[in-house]
Amino acid sequence: MTKTELNKFKKILESRRDELEQVVRNRDAITIEKSADALDEVQHAAERELAIRNLDRESNLLRNVRAALARIADGSFGVCVHCEEEISPKRLNAVPWAPYCIQCQEQADRNRDEGNEGFEDMLVNAA
C-alpha cells in the first residue's frame, strides 16, 4: 500500500473516530426518566433500551476504528489479523476499519451466528 493510500485511510479513520467520540460522549438518551404514567414509563424504557443498543454499537465501531489507526501506526494496516493475507483495496474502501480479509470475516460471522462468541477473540489472539 502506498503512503498516499495510507494517509487517505488515516484521514478517513481519524474523522470517523472524532465523530464517534462525540456520539459516545452524549449519553443523555440513556438517562432513566420517571413518570407517573405507566405507559410513559414503558415508552421511556423502550427508548432507553434502543439508545443503549446504539451506544453499544457505536462504542464497538469506535474500538474498531481506533484499532485500525493503531495498525496504521505499527505498519500492519491492510493485512488480515488472522491469516496475514492482504485485505483487498475494495474491502478497505468500503470498511476502512476492517481487521479481517473477507474470507476470515465470513468465518467469524458464521461462528458468531452459531453462538461461538469467542471466535473473533481466537482469531485476534492467533494472529
Image (cartoon, rainbow, N blue to C red):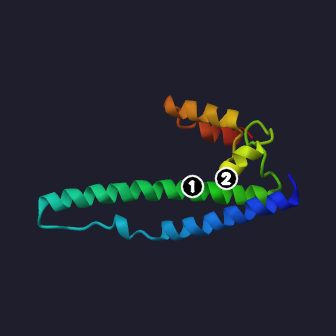
Query: What's the distance in space between the residues labelled 2 and 1, CA to CA?
Result: 8 Å
- Numbered-mark total: 2
Tell me residue 116's x, y (percent).
Answer: 53, 32
In the picture provided, is 120 more to the left or to the right than 34? right
Element type at mark 1: helix
- Local packing at callout 1 (Cα closer than 10 Å; few below 14, some 14-19, many 20+) is some
Quadrant for residue 121, please give it.
Answer: top right
Element type at mark 2: loop
Q: Residue furthest left?
A: 37
Q: What residue is shown at x 41% (from left), y 53% (from top)?
A: 53
In the picture provided, is 5 more to the left or to the right than 19? right
Disc 2 and disc 1 in contact, CB within 8 angstroms? yes
The residue under label 2 is: 97
- Tell me if residue 15 comes above or below residue 77 in the rendering: below
Tell me residue 70's x, y (percent).
Answer: 73, 59
Q: What residue is shown at x 57% (from left), y 68% (from top)?
A: 19
Q: Residue furthest right?
A: 2
In the picture provided, is 115 more to the left or to the right than 92? left
Quadrant for residue 101, please give it.
Answer: top right
Tell me residue 48's x, y (percent).
Answer: 32, 60
Name which residue type carries label 2.
Trp
- Local packing at callout 2 (Cα closer than 10 Å; few below 14, some 14-19, many 20+) is many
In the picture provided, is 41 more to the left or to the right than 24? left
Name which residue type carries label 1.
Leu
Where the C terminus falls, by quadrant?
A: top right
**Which mark is drawn over residue 61?**
1
Which tag, 2 or 1, sits closer to the chain's start?
Answer: 1
